[in-house]
Image: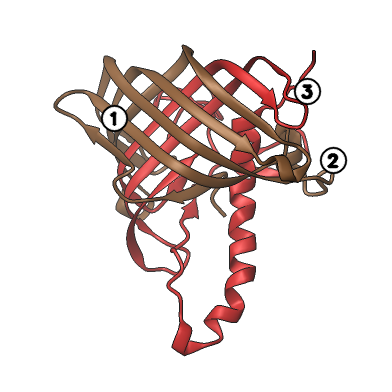
Chain colours: A brown, B red
């Protein structure tokens, strides 16, 4: 099973390699709120309480290419492609419904520290 | 005023994978009725690389970093799915904002660390067939 991956509508994510930008825009993605990383990764879920949550809106943009890695290939991990390291900016609103007893809402501000960001075109596995 | 800290995006995304399990369970009665057959989204396959977590589980994942790799578990393939050809993007971010406890109405500054990605293109699903689709790691 792919780790922490959820399907999103086609067209939600795209890149413009000529402009050096990429974007992810999703609305109302249903997820669960396990409150902590450890809960998500522990089969027994020690808190025993997982609440339904919604990523109401998520807008993430990559831009400002700082390094280009063209024609990269890694036979050990079986992937190759062209990659562009960038900056990024995000706006997100997420909510866990009040009816769960753990109602919580987060609204991000404009301040984001980018530890690392990149986008690219790649092939892996059978397409490598 | 205190709001218990939640690593919200990390945690909520974590259960997105559990959502697959729930979906497959719920779909059985529907699939049993051919007349009402519902097309289920193809599920992608994980990358083969694994990391042992401190919680006794194993995940298919590389931590964010350059494709050349920083160490055996950091960098390398940014995709979470295997047998994939398309566009990929990842961002390792420190978010700030405001968190509100909807049960008490208390609000406070809130921040968390998030690793977010998308993969959009062609992939070979767990069914062995090639599909086109998009996925988010959130």
Residue A22: which numbered mark, if any?
A: 1
Question: Residue B134 at what x, y percent from top left?
Answer: 37, 49
Chain letter for mark 3: B
Mark 1 and mark 2: span between their CA atoms? 37 Å
Residue drawn at x 33%, y 23% as measured from the top left: A62
Residue B4: which numbered mark, if any?
A: 3
Q: Are marks 1 and 2 on the same chain?
A: yes
Residue pointed to by mark 2 = A47
Under tag 2, what secondary structure? loop
Left or right: B83 as drawn, with respect to A105 = left
Mark 2 and mark 3: span between their CA atoms? 14 Å
Q: Are marks 3 and 1 on the same chain?
A: no
Under tag 1, what secondary structure? strand
Q: Quadrant of residue B112 in the image?
A: top right
Under tag 3, what secondary structure? loop
Rendered position, A111 above or below B138: above
Question: Residue B72 at what x, y percent from top left?
Answer: 55, 29
Residue drawn at x 60%, y 17% as measured from the top left: B98
Select label 2 or label 3 by which is in front: 3
Rendered position, B46 above or below B104: below
Judging depth in this view, the residue of A36 and B123 nearest the camera is: A36
Which residue is at the far front? B105
Residue A116: which numbered mark, if any?
A: none
Judging depth in this view, the residue of A13 and A41 nearest the camera is: A13
Mark 3 and mark 1: span between their CA atoms? 34 Å
Question: Residue A32 at what x, y percent from top left?
Answer: 65, 45
Label 2: few (<14), some or many (≥20) within 10 Å?
Answer: few
Query: Which tag, 1 or 2, sits closer to the chain's start?
Result: 1
Label 3: few (<14), some or many (≥20) within 10 Å?
Answer: few
Judging depth in this view, the residue of B102 and A67 nearest the camera is: B102
Residue drawn at x 61%, y 33% as measured from the top left: B10
């Amino acid at each position: 099973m792919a780790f922490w991956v959820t399907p999103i509508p086609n067209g939600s994510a795209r890149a413009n390699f000529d402009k050096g930008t990429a974007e992810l825009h999703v609305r109302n993605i249903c997820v669960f709120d396990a409150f902590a990383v450890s809960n998500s990764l522990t089969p027994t879920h020690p808190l025993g309480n997982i609440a339904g949550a919604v990523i109401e809106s998520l807008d993430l943009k990559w831009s400002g290419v700082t390094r280009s890695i063209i024609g990269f290939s890694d036979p050990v991990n079986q992937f190759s492609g062209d990659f562009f390291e960038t900056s990024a900016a995000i706006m997100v609103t997420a909510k866990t419904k009040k009816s769960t007893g753990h109602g919580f809402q987060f609204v991000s501000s404009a301040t984001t520290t980018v530890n690392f960001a990149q986008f690219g075109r790649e092939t892996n596995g059978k397409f490598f | 005023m205190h709001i218990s800290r939640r690593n919200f995006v990390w945690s909520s995304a974590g259960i997105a994978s559990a959502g697959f399990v729930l979906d497959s369970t719920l779909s059985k009665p529907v699939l049993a009725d051919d007349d009402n057959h519902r097309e289920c989204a193809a599920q992608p396959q994980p990358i083969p690389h694994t990391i042992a977590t401190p919680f006794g589980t194993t995940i298919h994942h590389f931590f964010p970093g350059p494709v050349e790799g920083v160490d055996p578990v950091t960098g390398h393939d940014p995709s979470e799915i295997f047998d994939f050809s398309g566009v990929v993007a990842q961002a390792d971010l420190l978010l700030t904002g405001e968190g509100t406890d909807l049960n008490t109405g208390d609000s406070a500054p809130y921040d968390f660390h998030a690793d977010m990605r998308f993969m959009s293109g062609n992939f070979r699903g767990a069914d062995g067939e090639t599909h086109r689709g998009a996925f988010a790691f959130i």
